[in-house]
Amino acid sequence: MSAYEEYISEKEKLDFLVERGYRIVKVTETLDGSIVEFELREKMPGNNRDKKEVLQLSNADARKYCSSIIIEQQRNPTHAK
């Protein structure tokens, strides 16, 4: 897979989670890239459980894109993207 195809694939995964209401809660940098942890709080009557997802990003451009999502979430905590 080319670097561009890898970027598009990882970007689509990020967008998919963000569009469904997940927020980035933690990023861990490793030698292989970034491990991004997402959380979705489901607020239903009698059910306050958290849903978590983890995504590994290895493409540098996808990691930069992830940073832009984090900045947007910090600027507007109630609505990301």
Image (tube, rainbow, N blue to C red):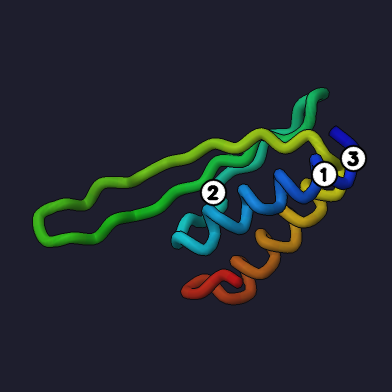
Mark 3–mark 1 distance (CA, rounded to whole Å): 6 Å
Q: Is 37 placed left or right of 46 in the picture?
A: right
Q: In this view, does 44 lie above or below 6?
A: below
**Nearer to us in this view, 17 or 75:** 17
User: How far across and down, in percent of the image, does residue 22 sit?
Assistant: 47, 55
Q: Is 7 placed left or right of 23 in the picture?
A: right
Q: Which of marks 2 and 3 is in front?
A: 3
Give the amino acid at mark 3: Ala
Residue at screen point 32% across, 46% down: 50
Q: Name the residue under label 1.
A: 5
Residue at screen point 65% across, 41% down: 27
Q: Which mark is residue 65?
A: none
Residue at screen point 88% across, 46% down: 4
Q: Is 28 placed left or right of 53 in the picture?
A: right
Tag 3: Cα neighbours inside 10 Å, few (<14), some, or many (≥20)?
Answer: few
Q: Specify which label sits upstream in the sequence, 2 or 3.
A: 3
Give the amino acid at mark 1: Glu
For label 1, the SS is: helix
